[in-house]
Amino acid sequence: MSKPPGRDRKRGAVMKNLDFGLDARVIRTYYICQLTIRNSFKQSPMSRRWALSAAVSNPDSGLNSTVRSDAVATRLRIVAAAERLFAERGIDGVSLQQINRAAGQRNRSAVQYHFGNKEGVIHAILDKHTAGIERRRHELLDEIEASGKLELRRLAEALVIPLAEKLDDPDGGIAFLRVNAQLIGHPDFPLLELHAQRVNRGADRLHRLTARACPDLPMELWMSRWLALGGLLFHGMADYAHLTERNGGAALNIPRSVFVSNMVDCAVAVMEVPQSPETDAELERSRRPDEETPHV
């Protein structure tokens, strides 16, 4: 069976460029990497995101190390540019081409190549920061469980402190808080759905422990209060950071430690405040299968 014309010449050129003492295993790794990236563009944006990561994460050779480090460096530049622009102009006010230019990419398709679309970029921003948040949250939860005392305030600290530490993170920490604040209620990229697509064991662990600390709180109210806490924390911290920047490092004369401790107090208050008789009545009404819950 004859080979398509030009294929041997193209392969020969590639082999010539690779002819610097590499063995067959290295060359095979190179081709697998390229084919994985190419085939990933036939998949969904989410599959493409993970396919690209897999293509550059296998430490199988010196060549793949170079490919991996170059790809990672490019991705980091794009993510840094994207989170800064999203924080400054809003998610809807930034195009992929603007991200591309801000990241210094000469290839006009670099963002699409690495992330597929804007949702892929947003996922990459969340991935960049949530790993550290998760580690810190596990540390705090380990201390709580080791003490043998399930105190609601300490659980609230495990919720608030890992996020508040982003206020001091020079590598896009404040931008991350602002982006999350925008994602709450966003019609195209709702925060809950984005986080549902990733494994957040620290958050899941915190939810379980908080439910144990509030055994008398009905599940419907527990879930509603967690929704309220998301808006309180991300919008509160984003606003605090904004006021701090605009006022030369002092947000309404509120010291950072006071602000963070008060956010913990607010989280505790949201979770432990008794439900009102009116809420109890609405909850009881909503559980009756023969009655339709009125819309307000």
Image (cartoon, helix red, strand yellow):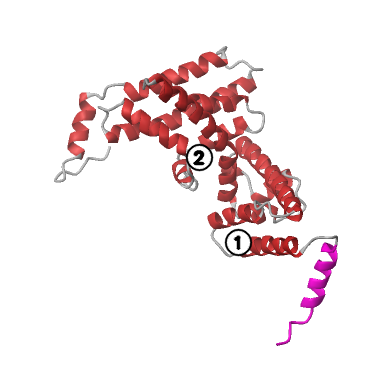
Q: Can you tell which quarter of the image residue 30 is in?
A: bottom right
Q: Is residue 123 above or below residue 179?
A: below
For disc 2, the neighbor class at 10 Å (few under 14, some 14 to 19, many from 20) is many
Residue 234 in sight from this viewpoint: no
Residue 147 is situated, as x and y percent measured from the top left of the image, at 41, 20
First reached walking from the N terminus: tag 2 or tag 1: 1
The reply to whether residue 4 is visible in this rendering is yes
Q: Which mark is residue 183?
A: 2
Label 1 sits on residue? 40
Horizontally, is 283 left or right of 88 in the view?
Answer: left
Q: Nearer the viewer, residue 37 or 182?
A: 37
Circle 2/circle 1 CB separation < 8 Å: no
- The image position of residue 244, as x and y in percent, is 61, 20
Quarter of the image holding residue 51? bottom right
Mark 2: amino acid: Leu
The residue at 73%/86% (across/down) is 2
Instruction: Find residue 67 and report its horizontal and vertical position in percent.
Output: 74, 53
Magenta-span inclusion, residue 13: yes
Q: Which residues are magenta?
A: 1-19
What kind of element bears circle 2? helix
Q: Reply above or below: 116 against 208.
A: below
Magenta highlight on residue 222: no
